[in-house]
Image: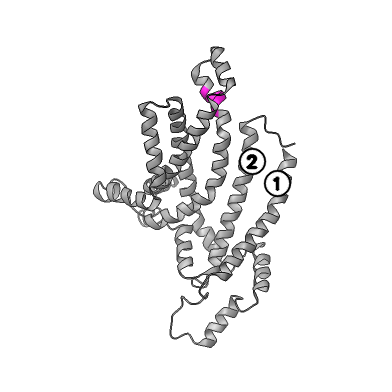
C-alpha cells in the first residue's frame, strides 16, 4: 500500500502541471481584458499601463506562466486586481465557510442517499421503492439554486423558522458567546444551504446505491448466504453492501468538483461569504489571479480526493491489492 501511495503521488505531479497549463491557457484565451472592469475615467493610459506592469500582465504569455507557477509553488497566487489583496489570503479567509458547507452537504448526502438506496433495492417494486425513486428523480432534476429559493420562501420568509442568509449572526450579537454557542449559531444558519445542496447529492447517491445493490443481491454468494440461514440484515449490510460500495466510492471521488461548483451557487443564493461569492465576482470582473488561484485549489482537492477514493477501494474490498 505504501508503494502504491508513493507511485500515485508521483503520477499526480505531471497531471497537476497539465491541469495548470490548461487552466492558464483557458484564462488567456477568454474574451476581455484583465482591467476592462475598471471604468474609472480618472485612470489615465499611463496609470493603466503601470497597473498591468505591477501585476505582470505586460509580459509574454510563457513568461507569465512560469512566473506564476514558481510563485504558486511557494504559496503565492498573486494579488487580486480589484481588491488589492493577496489571493492566498482571500482563499484562506473564504475557505472555512465553503469547506463547512461542502463537507456538511456530503455527509447529509451519504447519510440519506445510501440508506434510501439500500431500502429501495431490498424492497424493489414495492410502494417504498416508488417513493424513493420519485424522491431521486425530483432531487436530480431540480437545480440547487431553485430548491434553495423554495427553502428560503417556505422556511425562512413564510414560516420564519430559520435564517435565510449569512454564515452566522453579526459579531456584536456573538460578542460574549462561547465557542459552542458560536458553532451552534453557524449550524443554525447553515440548515437551509446544507439541505439544498445535500438533498441534491443524496438523490444521486440513492440511485447509484440502488443500482449497485440490485446487481449484488442477485449474486451467487448472496443466494448461498441465504441458503446457509444467515440473517437477512447481516447478508445485506455485511456481504452485499460492502461489495456495492465500490461504485459509491468512485462517485464520491468524482463528486468533489461538482460539490464545489454547487457550493458556489448555494453561497450566492444564501449570501455565504465563501469561495463561491468571490469566484462569481472574479469571473464577472475578469479578476484572473483569483480565478486561476481558486481553480488550482479545486484541482488539488480533486486529485487528493481521487487518491483517497482509490485507497478506500482496498478498505472496502480486501480483494483489491495494490502491491
Query: From the viewer's perspective, is residue 292 above or below residue 180?
Result: below
Can residue 67 be found in the magenta stretch?
no
Position of 67 with respect to 246 (left or right) is right
- How far from the left and from the top, in percent, is residue 247? 56, 37
Nearer to me, 127 or 47: 127
Q: Say which label, 2 or 1, has the lower sequence index.
A: 1
Q: Quadrant of the N terminus?
A: top right
What residue does disc 1 label?
Answer: 8
Mark 2, Cα crowd under 10 Å, few <14 / some 14-19 / many 20+, is some
Q: Which mark is residue 225?
A: none
Mark 1, Cα crowd under 10 Å, few <14 / some 14-19 / many 20+, is few
Between the residue at mark 2 and the residue at mark 1, the CA separation in whole angstroms equals 10 Å
Q: Residue furthest left?
A: 158
Q: Contact (CB < 8 A) between labels 2 and 1?
A: yes
Residue drawn 48% across the image and 62% down it: 279
Overall secondary structure of the magenta stretch?
helix
Nearer to me, 280 or 29: 29
Nearer to me, 102 or 243: 243
Q: Is residue 147 visible?
A: yes
- How far from the left and from the top, in percent, is residue 183? 43, 46
Query: From the viewer's perspective, is residue 121 above or below residue 248?
Result: above
What residue does disc 2 label?
Answer: 310
- How far from the left and from the top, in percent, is residue 272? 41, 56
Residue drawn 45% across the image and 63% down it: 280
User: Picture quarter containing residue 292?
Assistant: bottom right
Residue segment shown in magenta: 236-241
- How far from the left and from the top, in percent, is residue 199? 41, 42
Amino acid at each position: 500500500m505504501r508503494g502504491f501511495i508513493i507511485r500515485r503521488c508521483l503520477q499526480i505531479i505531471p497531471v497537476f502541471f497539465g491541469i495548470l497549463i490548461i487552466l492558464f491557457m483557458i484564462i488567456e484565451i477568454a474574451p476581455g481584458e484583465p482591467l476592462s472592469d475598471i471604468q474609472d475615467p480618472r485612470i489615465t493610459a499611463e496609470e493603466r499601463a503601470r497597473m498591468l506592469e505591477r501585476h505582470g500582465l505586460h509580459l509574454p504569455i510563457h513568461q507569465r506562466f512560469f512566473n506564476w507557477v514558481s510563485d504558486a509553488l511557494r504559496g503565492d497566487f498573486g494579488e487580486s486586481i480589484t481588491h488589492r489583496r493577496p489571493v492566498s489570503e482571500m482563499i484562506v479567509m473564504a475557505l472555512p465557510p465553503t469547506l463547512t458547507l461542502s463537507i456538511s452537504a456530503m455527509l447529509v448526502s451519504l447519510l440519506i442517499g445510501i440508506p434510501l438506496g439500500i431500502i429501495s433495492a431490498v424492497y424493489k417494486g414495492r410502494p417504498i421503492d416508488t417513493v424513493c425513486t420519485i424522491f431521486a428523480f425530483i432531487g436530480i432534476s431540480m437545480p440547487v439554486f431553485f430548491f434553495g429559493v423554495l427553502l428560503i420562501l417556505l422556511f425562512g420568509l413564510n414560516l420564519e423558522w430559520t435564517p435565510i442568509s449569512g454564515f452566522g449572526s453579526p459579531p456584536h450579537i456573538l460578542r460574549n458567546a462561547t465557542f459552542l454557542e458560536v458553532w451552534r449559531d453557524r449550524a443554525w444558519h447553515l440548515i437551509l444551504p446544507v439541505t439544498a445542496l445535500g438533498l441534491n447529492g443524496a438523490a444521486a447517491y440513492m440511485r447509484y446505491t440502488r443500482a449497485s445493490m440490485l446487481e449484488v443481491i442477485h449474486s451467487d454468494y448472496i443466494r448461498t448466504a441465504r441458503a446457509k440461514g444467515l440473517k437477512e440484515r447481516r447478508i445485506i449490510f455485511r456481504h452485499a453492501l460492502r461489495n456495492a460500495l465500490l461504485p459509491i466510492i468512485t462517485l464520491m471521488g468524482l463528486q468533489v468538483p461538482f460539490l464545489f461548483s454547487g457550493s458556489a451557487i448555494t453561497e450566492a443564493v444564501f449570501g455565504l461569504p465563501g469561495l463561491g461569492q468571490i469566484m462569481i465576482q472574479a469571473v464577472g470582473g475578469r479578476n484572473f489571479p483569483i480565478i486561476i488561484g481558486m481553480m488550482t485549489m479545486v484541482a488539488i482537492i480533486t486529485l487528493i480526493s481521487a487518491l483517497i477514493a482509490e485507497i478506500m477501494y482496498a478498505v472496502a474490498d480486501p480483494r483489491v491489492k495494490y502491491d
